[in-house]
Structures are given as C-alpha cells and as structure tokens.
C-alpha cells in the first residue's frame, strides 16, 4: 500500500513539473563558470528535476548499501553471542547433572574479546 502511494505521489509530482515546464518555454540565460548560454526554460526545469532525482537516488542507494553492511555485521555478532549462550547453557546443564552449584560470574564484553584473542 505504501508503494502505491509513493508511485501516485511521484506521478502527481511529474505531472506538475511537466505542466510547469510546458508553460515556461521562453529562453533564459544560463550562466556557467566558463560562459553563458541561452536555453529554453523547459529544458532547464527538466534537467534540474532529473539531476535532483539522480542525486537523491544515488544517495538512497549508498544509504541502503551501508545499512546492509551494518545488518550483516550485527547478524554476525548475534550469531557469536547465540553460540556463547548455547555454550553456557550446555555448561549449566552439565553442572546440574553433576549436582554442582557454580559461583555466579559476570562476563563483560572486554573478557569476551580477551577470550577470542
């Protein structure tokens, strides 16, 4: 449903830009750093809209790539912690079978890093 609203909003925006561009067909001066040229205003408007779309698309793709990398790193960290939990549960089970009550220990992330090295 959200995608349908985004498509509809994009179409409405495209129609507004197209109508605005068709109404403004006069030539306007476009100043470059190295010179000046006369361009129809419709081309300036459409080129500006296209460049804005491309820039926002590239930024969205870059953000998505960063988020995917972060997700993979967090999934890897979660797998390591799940493995640690399973190991500790097995140890608890062994202690319970033997009837031994172990002393409570607090494991910090610094101790985990020392064990990994």
Image (tube, rainbow, N blue to C red):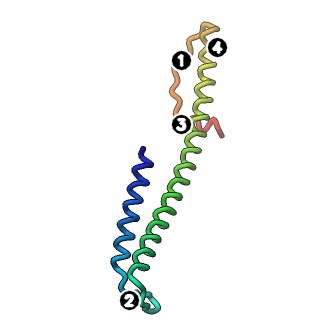
User: Mark 3 and 1 residues: CB-CB less than 8 Å, in contact?
Assistant: no
Q: Secondary structure under badge 2? A: strand
Q: Is residue 110 above or below residue 15?
A: above
The 10 Å Cα crowd at callout 3, few under 14, some 14 to 19, many 20 or more, is few
Rounded to the nearest angstrom, the CA distance separating label 3 from label 2 is 63 Å
* Image-based side of 23 in relation to 98, left or right: left
Foreground: disc 4 or disc 2: 2
Rounded to the nearest angstrom, the CA distance separating label 4 from label 2 is 82 Å
Residue at (40%, 86%) from the top-left corner?
30
| Residue 85 percent coordinates (x, y) | 58, 26
**Residue that carries the numbered disc 4 in the rendered image:** 94
Quadrant in which residue 7 is drawn? bottom left
Rounded to the nearest angstrom, the CA distance separating label 1 from label 2 is 81 Å
| Residue 5 percent coordinates (x, y) | 39, 50
Quadrant in which residue 14 is drawn? bottom left
User: Which residue is at the far bottom?
Assistant: 35
Rounded to the nearest angstrom, the CA distance separating label 3 from label 1 is 19 Å
| Residue 73 percent coordinates (x, y) | 58, 44
Foreground: disc 4 or disc 1: 4
Tell which of 13 and 82 is nearer to you. Answer: 13
Quadrant of the snapshot with the C terminus: top right
Q: Work out whether mark 4 precedes mark 1 in sequence or the reverse, and give the earlier one.
A: 4
**Residue that carries the numbered disc 1 in the rendered image:** 103
Q: Is residue 39 above or below residue 17?
A: below
Q: Secondary structure under badge 3? A: helix
Residue at (43%, 91%) from the top-left corner?
36
């Amino acid at each position: 449903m959200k995608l349908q609203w985004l498509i509809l909003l994009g179409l409405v925006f495209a129609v507004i830009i197209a109508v605005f561009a068709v109404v403004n067909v006069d030539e306007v001066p476009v100043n470059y750093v190295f010179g000046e040229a006369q361009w129809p205003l419709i081309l300036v408007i459409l080129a500006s809209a296209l460049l804005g779309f491309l820039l926002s698309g590239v930024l969205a793709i870059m953000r998505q790539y960063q988020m995917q990398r972060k997700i993979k790193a967090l999934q890897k960290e979660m797998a390591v912690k799940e493995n640690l939990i399973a190991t500790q549960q097995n140890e608890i089970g062994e202690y319970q079978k033997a009837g031994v009550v172990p002393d409570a220990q607090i494991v910090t992330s610094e101790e985990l890093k020392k064990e990994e090295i």
